[in-house]
């Protein structure tokens, strides 16, 4: 019977373990696959050949096609669950060398969570299965006209679209990572400023008004005019960003106590996050 040989420089054990797992299922269907290890220079090959059982249930052609299907399934699994991690690390090291080693490691962790479908505390395997199925199809197409496949070379030269998708994913996550890092540094700066400067006023009450506006009053209910009337902060759509105006006013006044007259969940999320992080124990809600 025709032998299919899978070569690798470093992943022989992973390939063998995965193929053995696949071939156990074929035994139950009367298809027995014999494997043998072949050394060829710095590569190790695992030869897979079909052994006909006494109670043949499939034609030789069908049994060979099934064997290749199971080989493709095993190899696509090794690529997605093993090789992929190294590919992502290489992309980060080459394309995002400006990051410190620590930040590169953080970026890697975030990318792998996306790749493994860990979204907002739940597991979504769609993206992972999508990659695996595309790779499986490429391997099957290759094995139709080739009896040997070297895993690392196949990934490098035959899966360029797959690697481009990984690069795009890393780039998107890196962009979000940089935005989050800049936000964190910005909040730390605001907090440092608030803690460093002496309070202009001891206690400020924040009163939400209609239209997303806020009124600031002191402990006696007297209005606090902390921002000139001609100062505005607008968002991308040209609308006034009242949350930013509120933060700016509170940071400028650096009060010892900030009392917000509403529940936290009623505030805009971005405003709530900055208030909580910058003013921490100074902040109260009533």
Image: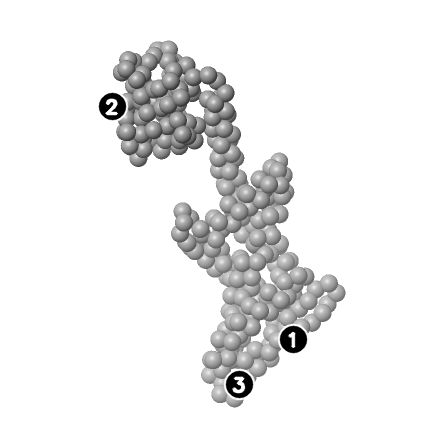
Q: Image height check: is 143 above or below 118? A: below
Residue labelled with disc 1: 36
Q: Image height check: is 84 above or below 216? A: below
Left or right for 7, reference 197: right
- Image x and y of residue 229, in percent: 35, 11
Instruction: Looking at the image, tell me whether mark 1 or mark 2 is earlier in sequence order.
Output: 1
In whole angstroms, how far apart are the C-alphas of marks 1 and 2? Answer: 76 Å
Q: Quadrant of residue 211?
A: top left
Let me know if residue 154 appears in the view: yes
Left or right for 99, reference 279: right
- Image x and y of residue 128, in percent: 47, 55
- Image x and y of residue 220, in percent: 28, 15
In whole angstroms, how far apart are the C-alphas of marks 1 and 3? Answer: 18 Å
Residue labelled with disc 2: 210
Q: Is disc 1 placed on a helix, strand or loop?
A: strand
Q: Residues within 10 Å of mark 3 (few under 14, many from 20)?
A: some
Q: Is disc 2 placed on a helix, strand or loop?
A: helix
Using the image as rendered, state which of residue 208 and residue 33 is in the foreground: 208
Identify the mark at residue 53; answer none if there is no mark: 3
């Amino acid at each position: 019977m025709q032998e299919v040989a899978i070569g690798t420089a470093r992943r022989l054990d992973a390939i063998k373990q995965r193929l053995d797992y696949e071939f156990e299922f074929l035994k139950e269907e009367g298809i027995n696959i014999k494997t043998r290890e072949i050394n060829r220079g710095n590569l190790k090959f695992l030869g897979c050949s079909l052994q006909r059982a006494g109670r043949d249930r499939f034609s030789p052609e069908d049994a060979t096609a099934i064997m290749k299907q199971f080989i493709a399934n095993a190899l696509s699994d090794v690529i997605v669950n093993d090789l992929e991690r190294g590919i992502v690390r290489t992309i980060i090291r080459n394309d995002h060398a400006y990051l410190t080693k620590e930040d590169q490691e953080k970026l890697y962790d975030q990318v792998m969570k996306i790749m493994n479908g860990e979204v907002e505390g739940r597991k979504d395997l769609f993206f992972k299965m999508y990659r695996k199925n595309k790779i499986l199809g490429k391997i099957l197409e290759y094995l139709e006209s080739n009896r040997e496949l070297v895993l690392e070379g196949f990934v490098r030269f035959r899966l360029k679209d797959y690697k481009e998708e990984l690069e795009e994913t890393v780039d998107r996550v890196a962009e979000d990572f940089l935005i989050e890092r800049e936000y964190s540094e910005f909040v730390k700066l605001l907090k440092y400023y608030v803690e460093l400067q002496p309070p202009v006023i001891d206690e400020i009450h924040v009163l939400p008004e209609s239209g997303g506006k806020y009124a600031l009053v002191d402990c006696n209910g007297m209005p606090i005019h902390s921002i000139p009337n001609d100062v505005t902060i607008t968002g991308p759509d040209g609308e006034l960003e009242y949350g930013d105006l509120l933060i700016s006013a509170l940071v400028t006044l650096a009060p010892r106590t900030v009392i917000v007259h509403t529940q936290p969940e009623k505030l805009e999320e971005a405003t709530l996050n900055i208030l909580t992080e910058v003013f921490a124990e100074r902040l109260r809600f009533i």
